[in-house]
């Protein structure tokens, strides 16, 4: 919402007696917290989510309609499968993270020695591209600083494509 400074997310499941409200400075609420923050959401349960937005210091009121989320943490038969890419990722370091939306340092090691370039993309969680570049790979490594172009507060994904593999890491912008 243009001009919004605060968002409230009300998550309820009246049948189970669950009702929690979270206030954030971004339109994104990650559904991962522990019991010291709020009771966790329960696997297999469906919850209603309503949103309230503050613009010019005034809340709009929770929206009349709500969306629903169902928590599904069931592993595949025989346990969770860890993809090979998750085990075989080169070390990728980003700093500072959280970031101020300006300059993000990137260092990657362990790429194939024959590789001479890799593509990097930063997107918000809706898939909107914030920046894109082709980076030189020297002796299997990348070391550079990326300009995030004053990215607004929020969570972003940095996707590094090196050959046929794509590596992903989360970047948080918070001023």
Image (tube, rainbow, N blue to C red):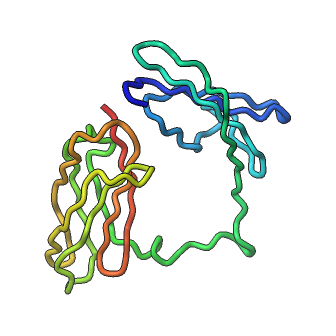
Quarter of image, res 3: top left
Q: Residue furthest bottom?
A: 114
Q: Position of residue 169 (x, y in %)?
A: 38, 58
Q: Quadrant of residue 74?
A: bottom right
Q: Residue at x 16, y 79 (%)?
A: 116
Q: Quadrant of residue 37?
A: top right
Horizontal side of 173 relative to 11 (left or right) equals: left
From the viewer's side, name the closer residue of 158 and 40: 158
The quadrant in which the C terminus is found is: top left
* Front position in the image: 50 or 16: 50
Q: As drawn, which residue projects farthest toward the top?
A: 57
Residue ranking furthest to the right = 15
Q: Is residue 140 above or below residue 70?
A: below
User: Is residue 116 rendered to the left or right of residue 31?
Assistant: left
Quarter in which the N terminus is drawn: top left
Task: Tell whether 134 sits left or right of 24.
Answer: left
User: In front: 165, or 97?
Assistant: 165
Residue 88 at x, y percent in the picture: 42, 76
Residue 104's spot in the image, x, y percent? 23, 49
View extreme (front): residue:
64
Q: Residue at x 77, y 46 (%)?
A: 45
- Residue 107, given in percent of the width and then of the height, sits at 23, 61
Residue at 47%, 13% (x, y): give it. 58
């Amino acid at each position: 919402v243009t001009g919004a400074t605060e968002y409230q997310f009300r998550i309820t499941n009246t049948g189970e007696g669950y009702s929690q409200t979270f206030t954030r400075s971004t339109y994104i609420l990650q559904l991962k917290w522990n019991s010291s923050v709020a009771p966790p959401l329960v696997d297999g349960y469906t919850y209603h989510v309503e949103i309230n937005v503050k613009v010019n210091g005034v809340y709009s009121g929770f929206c009349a309609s709500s969306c629903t989320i169902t928590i599904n943490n069931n592993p595949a038969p025989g346990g969770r499968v860890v993809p090979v890419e998750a085990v075989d990722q080169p070390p990728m370091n980003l700093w500072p993270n959280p970031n101020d939306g300006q300059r993000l340092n990137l260092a990657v090691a362990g790429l194939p020695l024959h590789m001479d370039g890799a593509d990097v993309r930063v997107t918000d969680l809706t898939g909107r591209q914030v920046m894109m570049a082709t980076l030189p790979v020297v002796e299997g490594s990348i070391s550079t600083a990326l300009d995030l172009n004053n990215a607004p507060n929020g969570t972003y994904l940095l996707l590094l494509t090196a050959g046929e593999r794509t590596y992903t890491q989360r970047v948080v912008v918070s001023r």
